Image (cartoon, rainbow, N blue to C red):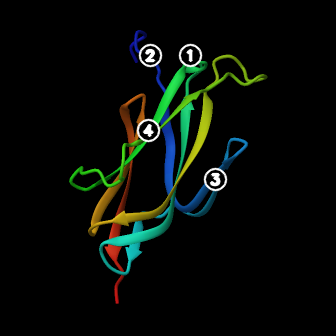
């Protein structure tokens, strides 16, 4: 690695679930880790879908503002969510008692109620950090076999 290259925040992991909550820095997940959603027909309205993610923030990036973004796209790159992409501004502090130089992790959850999938196929939640794509959480929505 080039000594001039700055280490920047990154997505440690992201998962899909029926429900996700964050409490005291921990993700609480119900029905998590799937990658295929089966529906009765299209367009499909799904009652509740959760995205859980953990961002790893290097020590040198603590105490700076960081923007976490989330958007939903179909397999052709068309936006699926109504309105603008979701964005949360955060500032990750250096926790007391943590050794200097340690990474700091930040857990976040997003809940989508009555999300409409217009057609079968591939979808992805595009996760961005400071307006740069950091990860894609890919999944498929298919008609339930009869």
Res. 60 mark: 1
Name which of mark 4 and mark 3 comes first in the sequence. Answer: 3
Image-quadrant location for residue 58: top right
Q: CA distance from mark 1 to mark 3?
A: 28 Å
Cβ–Cβ under 8 Å for marks 1 and 2 = yes
- SS at mark 1 in the image: helix
Displayed quadrant of residue 115: bottom left
Mark 1 neighbour class, 10 Å CA radius: few under 14, some 14 to 19, many 20 or more: some
In the depicted structure, whether residue 137 falls above or below residue 30: above
Query: Which residue was labeled with disc 4?
Result: 69
Query: In the rendering, which numbered label is found on residue 21?
Result: 3
Mark nearer the N terminus (4 vs 2): 2
Category of crowding for the residue at label 3, using alpha-carbon neighbours closer than 10 angstroms: few (below 14), some (14–19), many (at least 20) = some
Left or right relative to 46: residue 56: right
Q: CA distance from mark 4 to mark 1?
A: 21 Å
Which comes before the other along the chain, label 2 or label 3?
2
């Amino acid at each position: 690695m080039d000594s001039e290259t700055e280490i920047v925040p990154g997505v440690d992991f992201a998962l899909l679930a029926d429900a996700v909550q964050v409490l005291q820095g921990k993700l609480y997940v119900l029905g998590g880790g799937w990658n295929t959603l089966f529906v009765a027909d299209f367009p499909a309205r799904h009652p509740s879908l959760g995205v859980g993610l953990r961002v790893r923030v290097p020590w040198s990036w603590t105490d700076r503002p960081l923007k976490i973004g989330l958007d939903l796209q179909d397999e052709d790159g068309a936006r699926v969510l109504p309105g603008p992409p979701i964005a949360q501004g955060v500032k990750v502090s250096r926790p007391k008692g943590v050794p200097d130089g340690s990474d700091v992790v930040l857990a976040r959850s997003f809940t989508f109620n009555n999300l409409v999938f217009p057609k079968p196929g591939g979808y992805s939640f595009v996760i961005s950090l400071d307006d740069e794509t950091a990860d894609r959480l890919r999944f498929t929505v298919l008609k339930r076999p009869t």
